[in-house]
Amino acid sequence: MTPNDRIDLDFSKPELVVIPCGSRKLDHPARAADLYIGSYHRACRKAADALRPDRLLILSARYGLLDLDDVVEPYDTPHGATDAVASQLILEQATLRDIVRLDPVVALGSARHVGLVRSVWPHALTPLAGTRGMGEQMARLAALREGHVN
């Protein structure tokens, strides 16, 4: 992807961006904003920040929707594991937070992550859709971060 390439997405400043957790974490309790230290999570976070959403949440495989200031224990639960959060819990959390009707919503992450987000926000925009692997996802996240989005 060259600097002049643009991702063809038509959305204004999102009300909500949901990013994935990550398998690499600190080894002690920390704010959700600091707990996840892997390069993919950090790339999603930087892209999300560049979109300047009204609200940014992390979708944790163990805890569900996390605000950046939520302090949580590290864990080893991947999305899709038998003890991972399911769409029903995420819907309940979104309902309690009164954020179910937000629009536009952007979901950054893998197909599994996006599927969970879309179980609550079926209209969520998915800028990483159609990518073929981690390299393309990281390139698209960099383009989002650099503002190469229509």
Image (cartoon, rainbow, N blue to C red):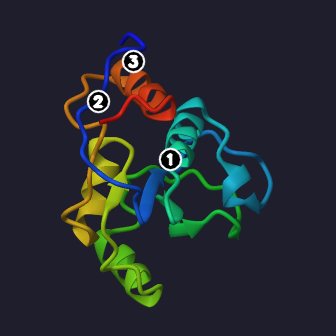
Q: Nearer the viewer, mark 2 or mark 1?
A: 2
Front in this rendered view, residue 54 or 116? 54
What SS does tag 2 mark? Answer: loop
Residue highlighted by disc 2: 7
Q: Nearer the viewer, mark 3 or mark 2?
A: 2
Residue drawn at point x = 67 percent, y = 44 percent: 25
The picture quadrant where one finds residue 38 is: top right
Q: Quadrant of the C terminus?
A: top left
Q: Residue at x 24, y 46 (%)?
A: 10
In the rendering, at what x and y percent does residue 5 appear? 32, 17
Counting from the top left corner in percent of width and height, residue 118 is at: 24, 62
Residue matched to label 3:
135
Residue 80 seen in the figure? no
Q: Residues within 10 Å of mark 2 (few under 14, many from 20)?
A: some
- Secondary structure beneath label 1: helix
The foreground one among 61 and 123 is 123
Q: Label for residue 48?
A: 1
Could you tell me the amino acid type at mark 1?
A: Ala
- Structural distance between the alpha carbons of marks 3 and 2: 15 Å
Precedes in sequence: disc 2 or disc 1: 2
What type is the residue that disc 2 sits on?
A: Ile
